Image (spheres, rainbow, N blue to C red):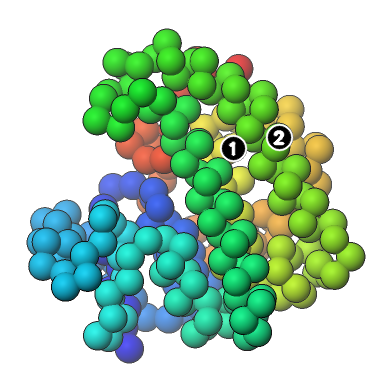
Amino acid sequence: MTYELYYWPTIQGRGEFVRLALEEAGVAYVDVGRQKNGADKVAAELAVQATPAFAPPFLKAGALTIGQTANILLYLGARHGLAPRAEAGRLWTHQLQLTIADFVNEAHDTHHPVGVSLYYEDQKKEAKRRAADFVGNRIPKFLSYFEGVLRQPKRRGGFLVGTRLSYADLSMFQVMEGLRYAFPKAMKRLEGDYPGLVALHDQVAQRPNIAAYLASKRRIAFNEEGIFRHYPELDR
């Protein structure tokens, strides 16, 4: 089966968490949004779904259409060795992914604290205040939590779940990449407190399938249209 991933063509966004899982699993997939007239194809498919997603990303897997990033990863993890086989392990991985989703939402809100439909330039004053709290309080709170998970005795191998890589590790890699792009000064100052997460990031980046993906044209560069955006005035 060839999966069809539906997401916007010019940004990493929430679709990138799904791309990383598909790439690591080495499965065939079509990134529909990056085809010719891809954005139109994504919008058209979104409009005709029997069980419509609120917004991309969504994944077509045979007769199934699955929306929401964490939900897609729950599906892929069970089928491609990116989550434990036992129910408790799968739910724990899903729980971590939902916490990552909360983290990602807060990162997004640093540049859009008032309204998603407004331009960044329309809310710069509020963004500076929100970003200061995010850098000073929320990044350390989230990273401390995930660092603590890694330090639990049963987390051998440096992974978040058990002794093998899961989709939660791939997603944590993406979060670290995004934070480094959006807040390079802050992350340079903070990273020393989270050696486990830095090591996890590096370990994921060196995996053969991920390394090949990162070096390829399939990997969209970070930019100021995505979730993680670099505005120097917010990197205090």
Q: Is residue 26 visible?
A: yes
**Label 1 crowd bin: few (<14), some (14–19), many (20+), radius 10 Å:** some
Q: Secondary structure at mark 1?
A: helix
Residue 190: quadrant of the picture: top right
Q: Which residue occupies 71% across, 57% down?
A: 200
Front label number (1 vs 2): 2
The residue that disc 2 covers is: 140
Cβ atoms at labels 1 and 2 below 8 Å apart? no
Where is residue 139? Give x, y as percent: 64, 35
**Residue at image location 85% in from the left, 61% down from the top:** 152
Name which residue type carries label 1: Arg
Residue that protrudes farthest toward the top in the picture? 125
Q: Residues within 10 Å of mark 2 (few under 14, many from 20)?
A: some
- Vertical side of 47 occupied by 111: above or below: above
Q: Amino acid at mark 2?
A: Pro
- Check the image and report above or below for 50 versus 189: below
Task: Name the residue: 37% across, 80% down.
Answer: 28
Residue 62: image location, x then y, percent? 27, 86
Of the 4 image quadrants, the one containing the C terminus is: top right
Q: Which residue is mark 1?
A: 180
Tag 2, which secondary structure?
helix
- For the N terminus, the quadrant is bottom left
The image quadrant of residue 31 is bottom left
Which is nearer the N-term, disc 1 or disc 2? Answer: 2
Task: Tell me, yes or no, if residue 213 can be seen here.
Answer: no
Q: Nearer the viewer, residue 67 or 178?
A: 67
Q: Position of residue 7 (x, y in %)?
A: 28, 58
Q: What numbered label is drawn on residue 50?
A: none
Q: CA distance from mark 1 to mark 2?
A: 14 Å
- In this picture, residue 13 sits left or right of residue 195: left
The residue lying furthest to the right in this view is 153
Taking the spot 43% from the left edge, 67% from the top edge, the residue there is 71
